[in-house]
Amino acid sequence: MIDKGASDLHITTGTPPQLRIDGQLVPLRTDALTPIDTKQLCYSILTDAQKMRFEEDQELDLSFGVKNLARFRANLFMQRGAVAGAFRIVPFKIVPLRELGLPPVVEELCEKPRGLVLVCGPTGSGKSTTLASMIDRINSNHRHHIVT
């Protein structure tokens, strides 16, 4: 996933795993997944408590890390009676705010002593990247209490 520059991994019964690369879903060159495959893949990252919660609610949002690689956000759900999942990479490396190409007002917000900042946008638009960069900038220059 990471070496291919993918932002997401989709696990669904009846198709090979698919990577989202530059906004397009690209199937991996492997066999289509069975319901047993998708359950094993998705359950492999869950604690026993998370498995119980998923089985009760039929969906689960979580995050997890792979040491020396990256963090991931995951959404597990039931699709056509089988376990499915969408996984998004959240890189360890925080991109400096100036490298994001955002308007100067974003940097100015990081200098405010207090207030509420809402970062909104569609999936994949950079909300988490923007917030991570803003928080890193604030933490580098100030001692504020930040709630996310």
Image (cartoon, rainbow, N blue to C red):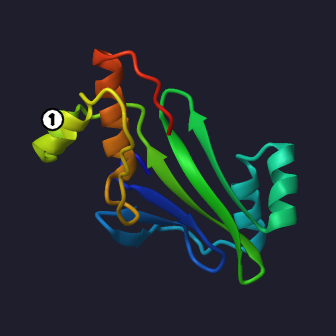
Helix or strand or loop: what does disc 1 sit on?
Answer: helix
Decide if residue 16 is on the left or right side of residue 27.
right
Q: What percent of the width, then of the height, locates residue 23?
A: 32, 68
Q: What percent of the width, then of the height, locates residue 40?
A: 76, 58
- Image: 92 above or below 10: above
Q: What percent of the width, then of the height, locates residue 79?
A: 69, 78
- Image: 141 above or below 114: above
Q: What percent of the width, then of the height, locates residue 19?
A: 44, 63
Res 2 visible: yes
Label 1: how many Cα within 10 Å (few below 14, some 14–19, many 20+): some
Residue drawn at point x = 67 percent, y = 62 percent:
76
Residue drawn at point x = 76 percent, y = 63 percent:
39
Task: Determine which quarter of the picture holds residue 109.
Answer: top left
Q: Identify residue type, mark 1.
A: Arg
Q: Which residue of the protein is positioned furthest toward the bottom in this rendering?
A: 80
Q: Count every numbered label the image shows and give the total.
A: 1
Residue with the mark numbered 1 = 98
Residue drawn at point x = 28 percent, y = 63 percent:
22
Residue drawn at point x = 15 percent, y = 35 percent:
98
- Image: 15 above or below 133: below
Decide if residue 30 is on the left or right side of residue 20.
right
Q: Nearer the viewer, residue 34 or 78?
A: 78
Q: Which residue of the protein is positioned furthest toward the front in this rendering?
A: 114
Decide if residue 63 is on the left or right side of residue 41.
left
Decide if residue 45 is on the left or right side of residue 128.
right
Q: Nearer the viewer, residue 80 or 117?
A: 117
Res 94 visible: no
